[in-house]
Every structure is written in C-alpha cells, then in structure tokens.
Amino acid sequence: MSPRPTLAAHTPDPATDLASGAEIVVRALLDQGVTTLFGYPGGAVLPIYDALHQDTDRHGERLHHILVRHEQGAAHAAEGYARSTGRPGVVLVTSGPGATNTVTGIVDALMDSIPMVVLTGQAPTHLIGTDAFQECDTVGITRSCTKHNVLVKDVNKLAETIHEAFQIATSGRPGPVLVDIPKDVQFAVGRYVAPKARGYAHHYAPQTTGDPRKVAEAAAMIAGARRPILYTGGGVINAGPDAAKALREFAKMTGPPVTSTLMGLGAFPASDPQWLGMLGMHGSYEANNAMHDCDVMICVGARFDDRVTGRLDAFSPRSKKIHIDIDPSSIGKIVRADIGIVGDAGEVVQALAAAWRQAGFGEARARLDPWWRQIDGWRSRRCFAYAASDSAIKPQFAIERLWAAVKDRNPIITTEVGQHQMWAAQFMGFEHPNRWLTSGGLGTMGYGLPAAIGAQLAHPDALVIDIAGDASIQMNIQEMSTAIQYGLPVKVFILNNEWMGMVRQWQELLHGERYAHSYSSALPDFVKLAEAYGGVGIRCDKPSELDGAIAEMLKADLPVLFDCRVERAENCLPMIPSGKAHNEMILPDFAGDLGSTIDAAGRRLV
Amino acid sequence: MTATTDTSSPGSAYFLDHAVEAEQKATYAIIVDNEAGVLHRVVGLFAARGYNIESLTVAETDRAAHTSRITVVTRGTAQALAQIRAQLEKMVCTRKVIDVGADEETFERELALLKVAGTGAARMEALRLSEIFRARVVDTTHESFVFEVSGASSKIDKFEALMKPLGLVEIARTGVLSFGRGAERG
C-alpha cells in the first residue's frame, strides 16, 4: 500500500491523474454529473468529507451535500431525488451504524427499482474481520438487498468501481448499488480514470430492445381483442418521460382502458377518459373488474404483486397475457405470460405502436364499444364514495380538498405508508410522471418526509407535499431539522386519526376488533413540534375550516406540519379482502359484517 | 356482489383447479466472475427465495478470464426452475448460465471417498466389489480400505449401499460436475 499522504498536502495531478482515494471519490461523483448527495459523516468517511470540503474551498460548492439527521433519511431522500428526476440518488455514510441505518432505504430502492449509489466508509483493510470499532460486514449485510455491491480494497480500482456502480444502478432494471470503501483506501494514492461507455469489470448488458417477432405477435393479439386492458407499472416511470408519452400514444391509437399500479401513477393522465384509476387491493372497482373480465391483458413494467393480483388462482382467469418487462425474471414469476417481451418499457411500446401501424390495424374502436359499456356500468358504482360529515373531517374529504387546492400547481406528492397513502392514491389525479413518490414494494413507514426533502432539493420551485399519518410521520420526523437547515418548504399533511389506521382496519376486519397496540398513545402536539423545529404548525378539526387552513399551509414558505384531525374509525375502501378475487371487492356501501367476508385461509395471508 | 354481468364467467373462480405441478431435477453450470462473495451471492439467492440446493461444486476454471464455474443441482416445478435460471442470470457477476441437465447430451460425474473397516470375508467382499465399480484403493491398513470412486451420482449411491453392510465408516463426496458432450462449448 502507498504511504499515507496528508490530504492537505496532496492535490490531484492532472498530468498523472494521481489522487487520494477520497479525492477519487469526489472526482468520480463530479464526472458522473452528481450535484447533490445525502449523507452523514463519521470516522470511516472523514477523508471523503475532507475532500468534499477542500473541493468546495477550491472550486465553490460543486457537490451539494445534504446533512440528514439519520442515515435512513439519507437513503429515502436519495430515493425521492431519484424518483422525481430520473437521475440516480447518491448517499454517503460512515461504516457500521451508518451503513446499517441505510439498509431499509436500500431495500426500499431495490423493491421499487430506484437508481441509487450508496458509498459507505469501512474500517481500514488491515482491521477488517477483527470486530474493529464501527466495523460491520456491510457487503455481507447488503448483498441480498442491493442490485450489486463491492468492497474496494485497491485504490487503483476505486474510480472504475464507482463509475461501474452508476452504470449498473441506472441501466436495465434500476436499483441500489453499494460501494464499501475502507478508510486506508481513502488515504492511499492511486490513479483516477474517467467514466467509459463499456468495458467494465462485469459484463453487465441488459436487453432493452424487444424481440420484434414477439412484438408483432403481441400487436396482432391486441388487435384481435374484444376486452383488452393496459396494466402499467413503475417500469413506465423508470423508463423515462418518453415511455409515458409512448404509452399515451399507444393507448390513444388502440383504445383500451388503462389502469396502473401504485408505483405507476402519473404515467397515464388521470383526466383521460380511458383511465380507470389504480388497481389492486384498494384500487377502483372498474379497474379490478376490468382486469378480471378482460380477454387480453397488456402488462407494461409491472410485476403482478400480491397487492395487485389478489387471489392468484382467480386472477383474470380468461385472459391472454402480454408481459413487457426489462427484467426477464419478472416474466412468468407470478403469472404465466402468453407473450413475454424483455425490454425497456418505452422502446417496446414504441415498437408495438410501429408494428400496429405496419400491420394496418387502424383505429377499429367500434369493436370495443360493448367493453366500454360494461366498464361504464362499473364506473357508475362510484366506488370511492364516502358518507360526508358536517362535524368531523373525513380523511377522503381532506385529500379531496387538498388536491383541489394544489392540482393546478403540478405538485410533487410523497406519502408514508398506510390508509393515508391509499386515500392519496385514490383521490389525487396525477397527470404527469415523476410527481408521485411512494414506497410501494417494501411499504416503508417513514419514507415520505425524507423523500419530500430529496424531491424539493431537485425541484426548488415545486410544491412538495408529504401525505402522512400520525404514526408514520414519527418514524423519520427528525428530518424536519434537515428541511429547516436547507430552507426546504416541504408541507407535511398529517391525516391524524390517532391510530395506525391500516393496522386498526385489519384488526377490525380480521382479528375480531381486538386492537392490539395500534392506538397512537401519547401523540406529540404536532403544532408545537413544528414550531420547536422552526417550522409552521397548523391544526384543523372542522370541515368548514379546512379550505382556509390548507390555504394558510400553502402560503407558508417554511416547512409545515399540518395536523389534520380526521374521523378516527374510517376504513379505507373499496378493498379486495385477503384470499378474494378482483370481482369480490368490498365496496364502501357494504353494510354487512366485514369480518365474515374473509375466511380463515384469508386471515392467514398478509 | 353483482360484479360481473358476463355469464361465461366462472364466477367463483375459486373452484378453478390449482394443479400441483410435478417437480423435476435440473443442473445449472453458472459461469461467474471470480470475485469475493460470488459464491455467497448464489447460495444466498437460493436460500432467500426458498429454493433447494441438492449439490454444489465450485472452482476457478478460467484463470485468464477470471471466471469460476459453479455447478448447482436443484429441484423444482418448471416455473420455479425457469425463475431460478432467470434470477441467476440477473446477477451482475453472472457471465452465463448453462442448463446442463436440460438434454440427453450431457453427463454428470461425482467423486467420492469411502472408508470401509473390517476383516475376513467382509473385507475381501469389499475389495472384490470395488473392482467391479472400478474404485481405486488410496489407503490401506490391516483393518481398513479407503476407496476412491467416480461416476454418476447414482453409481456412487449404489456403491455406498453395497459398502454399508461391509463396514462403511465414513464417506465424502465432491458434489456433481456436469458437462455437455461433443465439440461445442456449453
């Protein structure tokens, strides 16, 4: 190993491209076009923090480092940044607890296919394996929850490893990549190399172009359909704005109804007459029934999650299924695909449209008329209807009023996880991709506030609102301090029903109304809490005062905690109960005993 | 609930038959970049997704390309096997996955060491059987032999069964290596 230079004495030499490991990290990030990173310093990353500091001294702030208050917050903020921009989120944390605290955010990014690069400090190489201070087996811990991870032991491989991490994180099915950098490697002097287009250590080359034969076959299958449906997911968002555009054009051309998963909202405009709303457990009646009764299902960038399919052996029993996915392992994993096309969502949908035109299938929409009449029948059930109240704020009403106040400002909405998340998905009508950031696969309470911070940093002029619950918001409430420090006026709209609402709902439906530990005892005073952090606190508990209070929130140029006191016992409906099929939804006007509709087998499911 | 008006609907599709698919054996040779933790990735993938490993062998096979060949014998339904293969191919460090068990044009070899202790007729019988199985004697004392035998796993199973009543005290097996026949690379 090279002798340790003092960082102050060493500057990168452009002639030889020699630099310390810490400087190589900074330079690699700059060459990757990174402008913002989220992190928290500690012993094992101090050389990198020092290099960041010195880079700012020399060149001004080229890398904007956001100091979070907990490393989990850094990971979710990076996710919010990535999801709202399409660029990778970058995290920098220390070894041991710094690394382990990011694990939830890393798994979250893996489940929701969010491009992310996590740089962790590590004990010096000669101490690895000795239970050194703040040592943990970071690559071992994160091996199963990253797309790829590497421990860099040789400073001469550091630059290339970081560049490759960005390539892997952002190509194919995006995901988190972790690079673990021992402290002595950060001090050691090595050669910097610039990013390159190909030729990295691993031969990672995901297929992005769909098989033309299968594409033509799929176009013919869609042309022959009488009850087709487009079922789209987060893959369309990940594939970029062009993919959403291609989806819109293809839907217009071919005329089927469009539904989407939680992760895919915004890829297709909610105001479009072909839009059926979200599908799945708390999706719309029309979307779920159309999925159940369709004859050709075109799945684009979605993965047949159990929250979407309901009872699997009763899932869309009479349809042919076309599955388009960038990840070959998604195709046929849960549901057999009649035609599986591996490729980028945007590219394949464009190819489908080209194949459709080439075959001259035209706009033969008349044959879909009976299908649309049936769908209109389902729509007339008005599945999201709720009983209005003059005395208590219904949570659905709160979301509706909030959306009415903000929709014209093209807001970025983040959520925590639970009832509020589902109500937001039901009552907010997204018109554009990358404006809806939520934890779908992992279902991480505590995602919303840091994700909002990440999104606000990427979009300083946007209105960013975290829809939260009283329980979820407490999981990463410390990030209020981050929002204050960086002047990020994120709005946290808490549907406060004093319960872990979704847990309470399941206990009511499935566990004999025995509410084990789901009541939010000893809630903080959210108004005072906001003020303690230096933000604005607003409380509202009267439906008649809600619009005024929302207007007040929107006027504030500081972070706001809005304590919206809502009806406590409201359930999130409609709902496909566990173990039931898409055409067996419980609707809001269902008057019977909810518990009796779910059998013993269903109770055992999650 | 009057969800569907379509009378062709199976309605309670809950009574659709959920056929239980038969499991079959498969052998995959996974060519991977030989780097720290790569075996853990493969083994971890099987463990995390609930697949079973019946046999596992691994060694660096191409020093220049810096690749290892990991041979895994597993069992599952056709859908599970397709999923295992897709998951293996998805790993960044995977160069190639060869389904060696997929056709008749492949063969398997395994090597085993068996320690058999005994005297008199049993000892002589063990030695006689070892010749039939083309096993080599690699260690001898007055009371024991260590046999080295190679071949298909089923041959080794049979040899082990024959040695059991003759004083088998210990057996070690390498696990399966699998290979395609003919001139082509797998």
Image (spheres, rainbow, N blue to C red):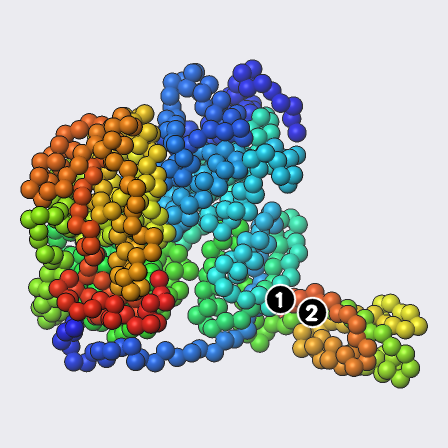
Return the residue at label 2: B110
Q: Residue at x 26, y 52 (%)?
A: A501
Counting every numbered tag in the picture gives 2
Count neighbours of disc 1 (C-alpha within 10 A) and say few if under 14, some if 14 to 19, many if 20 or more.
some
Q: Quadrant of residue A513?
A: bottom left
Query: Toward the viewer: A72 or B157?
Result: A72
Answer yes or no: do the residues labelled 2 and 1 have beta carbons within 8 Å?
yes
Give the residue displayed 62% in from the left and 54% down from the top: B68
Q: Percent from the top left, x then y, of residue B93?
A: 53, 51
For the point 69% across and 69% down, which residue is it?
Answer: B110
Q: Please state which amino acid type lies under the numbered disc 2.
A: Glu
Secondary structure of the residue carrying tag 1 is: strand
Q: Position of residue A310 (x, y in %)?
A: 29, 66
Question: Reading the chain from its start, which is encountered first: label 2 or label 1?
Answer: 1
- Residue B132 vertical placement versus B32 (above, below): below
Query: Does residue B79 show up?
Result: yes
| Residue closer to the observer: A387 or A429 | A387
Q: CA distance from mark 2 to mark 1?
A: 10 Å
Residue holding disc 1: B55
* Residue B77 position within the rendered picture, expressed as x and y whole percent measured from the top left: 47, 73
